[in-house]
């Protein structure tokens, strides 16, 4: 990629929500019927994108803690979304001392009156690192080049901050662009530690369907075209002038991307396109053009989205890419789809759900921008599988009957099996997971997508045997499906409103619960089904539930509440905050481990916090796990949860070896401490024999549900 999304401008983001201008009168081809324009979606709110953006920036200026902002942070705008009731959801990209922060993006959620409701972000604590590199850019580039495979065309190196890791670090963001050995565009991003020189993360900006295949036909369909002198052109004026062109079995060295006008336009004199034969180059073009139409119509008719970027602009598709290129893919840099003919050069790679899948990568890039590595990469890939499937169901073409299989008509492996199965992803035999594990983050995104695909199938269809498949659960439970319509709306709202670039599976659970709550209510069957479906793929419950307890972490007054930045902001005894395999976190990688020595020992964990006098029902909450080698009902080892105010120590609760438990949410009222600066303290005391371990995670001091932000204040 030549221009990371975290540098996009305000004008582009706000402009992306404006209605596109008048389009040329379309011509409807006789390759079978006509296509019609879709309803423009929800009625516009009285709140404008400019007002919502201003509210968001004022909220950050007045409440930097809500976005983990330091004095060195600045923010530039991304997409702006406004609900029917005027609630705003503004994406902002973070810079630290002028450097882009990879994984530092935030969504600011505002009430219709401009008050801050909450925020969504992955960053655990304010940044505080040196921005002086010890490793030079030339060294970083040489290191990154070693990972690049294929024909290198261009490179760029920029200093950035990596916030994807548990401990933020200064990195060189190296972008290497060219053509991979399989003829795919290669847009390799590599983060190189600017202090040690080691490779931290890498991902490819070009997304493919994976492997080799033969392709298929969509049958007799309608395609929307544009009249030209002497005939018609395969350009769709109903859908932002989306165009399908012939790559003429060439590829483009990725120096400046695919130029405007590259390839050959498909034209026809009578508007009756192709003949269904692969010897006719327009046959694959009809498939691709139809795929663009159906994907556009699904997102517009179902979700009110005006094109992939929601800006009314159609994408380009290039068929006959390369020689025997056995893949299809989406390039967000070029805002284009490419389709290969497949090996041995006779079967185009143009199945409908593959087209929907690849263009959904564009929707993800324009919204959450899920980074294509780790768990966020798996969620990115699953999002495309989900929407590719929903495009197929929405189209309901008899020539490609809808199902929960991905790429089944491609026959990519030559044995009649699909790329992926949503009912039981492991059926692919290639490493896709049915259930989330701590190793999910280490898989290729095509395989780490499994738990999310499985979740969606359970949410839409339910567990057990059906006409669509046979889907077991990972915990032996039974899940009743809520249907594609509700499940799709929940995933779309979660993606566009609550997911950020570094979203993990645990955070995806939170995002979909919030989305279900927004759409159907906290007590709805849909919200309950979301919780059950995630638990059924081993993504454990988080602090966010359909009942809404406890409040969102963005209201959290504690810094580094989940310990993902190590001991930052906490005062502890040695070794208390850890990612040791000797215990296990409730979520993330780090947790607090008090005691567990089996000898006389005292551990402490504390943090000072100011509780505003205007706080609404302030509470302390945390997850606690107790395991012990002690037996009987005698108390030997204890953990006290305390609040220290001045010289007074108040013990909220005492836990001991007599009450072992798995992680359980504990909540305490802090109303007595409003308007005071206090210390939240955990005190663990162990006697001389037989260990008791107290594990703490996901701490929170909450109670602010809305902060007033007067609209008259100038934006920073």
Image (cartoon, rainbow, N blue to C red):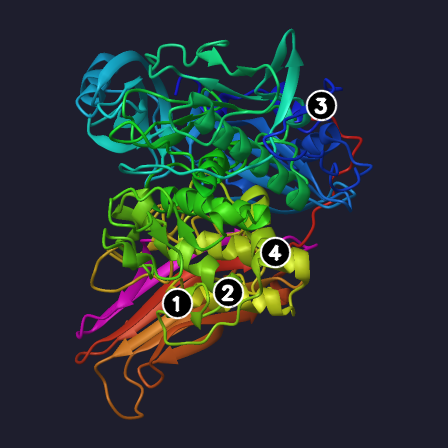
Secondary structure under tag 3 reads: loop
The numbered mark, 4 or 3, whose residue comes first in the sequence reads 3
| Residue ID for mark 4 | 485
**Label 4 with label 3: CB-CB less than 8 Å:** no
**Label 2 with label 1: CB-CB less than 8 Å:** yes
Can I make out residue 716 in this image?
Answer: no
Q: Is residue 300 left or right of residue 315?
A: right
The numbered mark, 2 or 4, whose residue comes first in the sequence reads 2
Quadrant where the N terminus lies? top left
Please tell me how crowded label 4 is: few (under 14), some (14-19), or many (20+) other residues with Cα within 10 Å: few
**Label 2 with label 4: CB-CB less than 8 Å:** no
Percent x, y for residue 130? 34, 26
> Which residues fall within the magenta stretch?
589-616
| Residue ID for mark 3 | 20
- On residue 471, which mark appears? 1
**Label 1 with label 3: CB-CB less than 8 Å:** no
| Residue ID for mark 2 | 461
């Amino acid at each position: 990629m030549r221009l990371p999304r975290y540098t996009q401008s305000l004008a582009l983001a706000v402009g992306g929500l404006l209605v596109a201008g008048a389009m040329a009168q379309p011509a409807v081809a006789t390759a079978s019927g006509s296509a019609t324009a879709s309803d423009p979606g929800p009625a516009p709110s009285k709140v404008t994108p400019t007002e919502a953006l201003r509210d968001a920036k004022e909220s950050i200026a007045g409440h930097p803690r809500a976005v983990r902002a330091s004095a060195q942070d600045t923010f530039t705008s991304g997409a702006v979304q406004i609900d029917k009731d005027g609630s705003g959801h503004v994406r902002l990209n973070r810079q630290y001392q002028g450097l882009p922060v990879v994984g530092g993006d935030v969504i600011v959620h505002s009430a219709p009156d401009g008050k801050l409701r909450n925020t969504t972000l992955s960053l655990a604590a304010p940044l505080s690192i040196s921005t002086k590199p010890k490793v030079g850019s030339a060294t970083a580039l040489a290191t990154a080049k070693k990972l690049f495979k294929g024909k290198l065309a261009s490179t760029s190196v920029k200093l950035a901050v990596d916030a994807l890791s548990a401990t933020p670090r200064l990195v060189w963001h190296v972008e290497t662009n060219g053509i991979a050995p399989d003829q795919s565009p290669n847009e390799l991003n590599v983060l190189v530690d600017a202090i040690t020189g080691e490779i931290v993360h890498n991902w490819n900006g070009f997304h493919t369907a994976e492997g080799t295949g033969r392709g298929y036909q969509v049958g007799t369909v309608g395609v929307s075209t544009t009249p030209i002198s002497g005939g018609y052109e395969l350009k769709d004026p109903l859908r932002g002038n989306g165009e399908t062109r012939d790559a003429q079995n060439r590829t483009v060295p990725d120096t400046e991307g695919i130029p405007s006008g590259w390839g050959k336009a498909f034209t026809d004199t009578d508007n009756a396109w192709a003949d269904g034969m692969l010897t006719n180059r327009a046959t694959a073009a009809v498939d691709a053009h139809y795929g663009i139409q159906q994907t556009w119509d699904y997102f517009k008719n179902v979700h009110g989205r005006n094109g992939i970027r929601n800006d009314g602009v159609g994408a380009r598709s290039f068929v006959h890419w390369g020689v025997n290129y056995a893949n299809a893919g989406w390039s967000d840099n070029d805002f284009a789809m490419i389709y290969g003919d497949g090996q041995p050069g006779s079967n185009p790679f143009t199945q409908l759900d593959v087209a929907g899948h690849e263009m959904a990568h564009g929707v993800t890039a324009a919204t959450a921008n899920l980074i294509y590595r780790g768990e966020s990469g798996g969620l990115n890939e699953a999002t495309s599988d989900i929407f590719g499937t929903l495009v197929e169901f929405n189209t309901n073409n008899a020539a490609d009957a809808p199902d929960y299989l991905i790429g089944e008509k491609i026959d990519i492996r030559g044995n009649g099996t699909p790329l992926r199965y949503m009912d039981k992803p492991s059926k692919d035999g290639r490493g896709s997971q049915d259930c989330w594990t701590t190793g999910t983050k280490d898989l290729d995104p095509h395989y780490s997508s499994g738990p999310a695909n499985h979740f969606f199938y359970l949410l839409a269809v339910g567990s057990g045997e059906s006409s669509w498949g046979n889907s077991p659960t990972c915990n032996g439970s039974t899940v009743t499906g809520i249907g594609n319509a509700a499940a799709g709306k929940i995933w779309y709202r979660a993606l566009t409103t609550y997911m950020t670039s570094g979203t993990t599976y645990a955070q995806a659970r939170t995002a979909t619960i919030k989305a279900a709550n927004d759409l159907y209510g906290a007590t709805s069957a849909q919200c309950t089904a979301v919780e059950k479906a995630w638990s059924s793929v081993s993504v454990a419950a988080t602090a966010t539930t359909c009942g809404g307890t406890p409040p969102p972490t963005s209201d959290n007054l504690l810094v580094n509440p989940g310990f993902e930045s190590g001991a930052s902001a906490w005062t502890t005894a040695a070794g208390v905050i850890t990612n040791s395999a000797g215990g296990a976190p409730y979520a993330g990688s780090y947790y607090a481990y008090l005691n567990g020595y089996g000898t006389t020992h005292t551990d402490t964990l504390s943090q000072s916090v100011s509780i505003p006098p205007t706080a609404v029902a302030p509470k302390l909450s945390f997850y606690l796990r107790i395991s012990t080698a002690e037996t009987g009902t005698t108390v030997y080892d204890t953990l006290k949860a305390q609040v220290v105010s001045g010289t007074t120590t108040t013990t909220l609760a005492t836990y001991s070896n007599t009450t072992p438990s798995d992680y359980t949410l504990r909540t305490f009222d802090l109303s007595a401490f409003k308007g005071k600066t206090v210390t939240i303290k955990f005190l663990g005391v162990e006697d001389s024999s037989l260990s008791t371990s107290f594990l703490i995670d996901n701490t929170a001091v909450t109670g602010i549900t809305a902060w007033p932000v007067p609209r008259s204040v100038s934006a920073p």
